[in-house]
Amino acid sequence: MDRKRCRWVPLDDPIYIAYHDEEWGRPVSERKKLFGMLVLEGFQAGLSWRTILHKRAAFVSAFEGFDPDIVASFGEKKIEALLKDAGIVRNKAKIRAAVVNAKAFLSIEREFGSFGAYLAALAPEPIVERGKTVSPLAERISSDLRKRGMRFVGPTIVYSYLQAIGIVFSHDEECFLSR
């Protein structure tokens, strides 16, 4: 018997199904994963998640495994190389944002001990919400991240990020992963 999934999951896409079933909405604490999802959500702005998901392996390679220490050190030569990388989305503003965001990510880690601790300070408990694309929490975090210098972290992007990393639980009620 087929599992019932969230209605947004394209059932003809095994990569998307695996993402939904094995990753989306599950709590994340590992720093490279937290940073990587933030980068990918920023690149997704104006595009489909399917596009980003299918390019994820290339993004992981291009952005050095999403190691924020390395990405923060990217200079113009690396940015120009990324603009020629057909495996990723070649958007100069988004590539530069990833570098700027890595620096802000490291600053937040220095202040809070970890990026996960920063998020936990703002959202100490997981939140169950369905049918939204933004929330007051996402607006607060977005505003704070922008004050800290991050880019491509508007409230909708942050809300999607919070869903992806399990802070906001949004599986459809009929989904086999619903609580």
Image: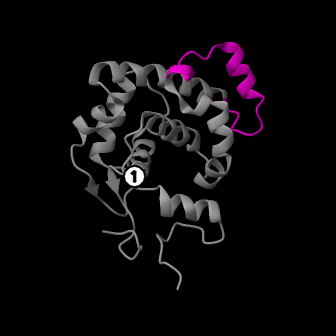
Foreground of the two, 167 or 46: 167
Foreground of the two, 144 or 123: 123
Residue type at mark 1?
A: Gln
The 10 Å Cα crowd at callout 1, few under 14, some 14 to 19, many 20 or more, is many
| Residue 94 in the figure: left or right of residue 105 | right
Residue 83 lies in the magenta-colored region: yes
Residue for badge 1: 163
Percent position (x, y) of residue 4?
A: 47, 78
| Residue 96 in the figure: left or right of residue 177 | right
Residue 108 lies in the magenta-colored region: no
| Residue 170 in the figure: left or right of residue 64 | left
Specify start and end residues of the magenta stretch as a single range. 69-91
What secondary structure is marked by label 1? helix
Percent position (x, y) of residue 163?
A: 39, 52
Foreground of the two, 108 or 26: 26
Percent position (x, y) of residue 174?
A: 39, 77
Q: Residue at x 53, y 36 (%)?
A: 39
Image-quadrant location for residue 146: top left
Q: Residue at x 63, y 13 (%)?
A: 75
Q: Residue at x 49, y 64 (%)?
A: 21
* 71 relative to 43, above or below: above
* 72 relative to 98, above or below: above
